[in-house]
Image: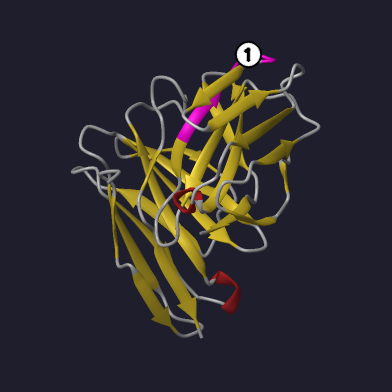
Amino acid sequence: DSGVTQTPKHLITATGQRVTLRCSPRSGDLSVYWYQQSLDQGLQFLIQYYNGEERAKGNILERFSAQQFPDLHSELNLSSLELGDSALYFCASSEGPHLSSYNSPLHFGNGTRLTVT
Amino acid sequence: TQLLEQSPQFLSIQEGENLTVYCNSSSVFSSLQWYRQEPGEGPVLLVTVVTGGEVKKLKRLTFQFGDARKDSSLHITAAQPGDTGLYLCAGAVSGGSNYKLTFGKGTLLTVNP
């Protein structure tokens, strides 16, 4: 158990809709990262928050947004959903602001499987 | 953009066999990580290698970082069904005070009893 909690585990919705994915980081971790995993693209970094502030941006679409709340949980909002948005969405957390494999390794949740029909 | 190519994409073997999977790039990495992801779960960090030529062992798993820090390999001895999973490599590039971590697409290993 990584200590990172993601809800819901599965989500099925229609094109054009909006969904919110939720992540609670491991106790003591201040950074939250969002990743998208699909068969053709692999694991793609979307965005990082540290202690409530956006820290780094990856391949995140403009239709997607995220935030980290004062209690450090994070939400990823996906809007105007398209069929191609179907994927596994992972949240990961780490202790510090810098993604360092030594002092601040990544701990992944078990993901939310999003299916857009 | 640093691309990591993992091979083979799929590997199905019998229990007790040995195997090696590869992670290659044209880019130089500050460090390289290996993760294992089991069905329905997130990736779990197995090891981090830092120095060119470094070899690390984790029970039956041997990880090697290439001399030029552009490639890595994972060798499993006497594979067991519990080794089944998606093996991901991730290369870290230092961008100032922060690392950028790029993942390969993985090798899906199935060990049959």
Residue A60, image x, y percentages: 55, 54
Q: Position of residue B102 (x, y in %)?
A: 62, 39
Which residue corresponds to the image point at 46% horizontal and 85% vertical from the top-left? A14
* Amino acid at circle 1: Thr
Relative height, residue A114 to residue B53 (above, below): below
In this rendering, would B34 be left or right of A5? right
Residue B57 lies, with reference to residue B106, above or below; the image says: above
Could you tell me which secondary element the residue under label 1 belongs to? loop
Circle 1 residues within 10 Å: few <14, some 14–19, many ≥20: some
Q: Which residue is mark 1?
A: B51
* Left or right, B24 with reference to B94: right
Please provide percent x and percent y for residue A58: 57, 45
Quadrant containing the N terminus of chain B is top right
Question: How far across and down, in percent of the image, does residue B27 sit?
Answer: 76, 29
Examine the image and state in which quarter residue A11 appears.
Answer: bottom left
Label 1: chain letter: B
Q: How is the image coloured?
A: secondary structure
Q: Is B48 on the left or on the right of B44, as rendered?
A: right
Relative side of B59 to B26, left or right? left
Q: Residue at x 52, y 24 (%)?
A: B57
Q: Say which of B12 and B17 sits in front.
A: B17
- In magenta, the rendered stretch is B46-53
In this rendering, the answer to whether B90 lies above or below A34 is: above
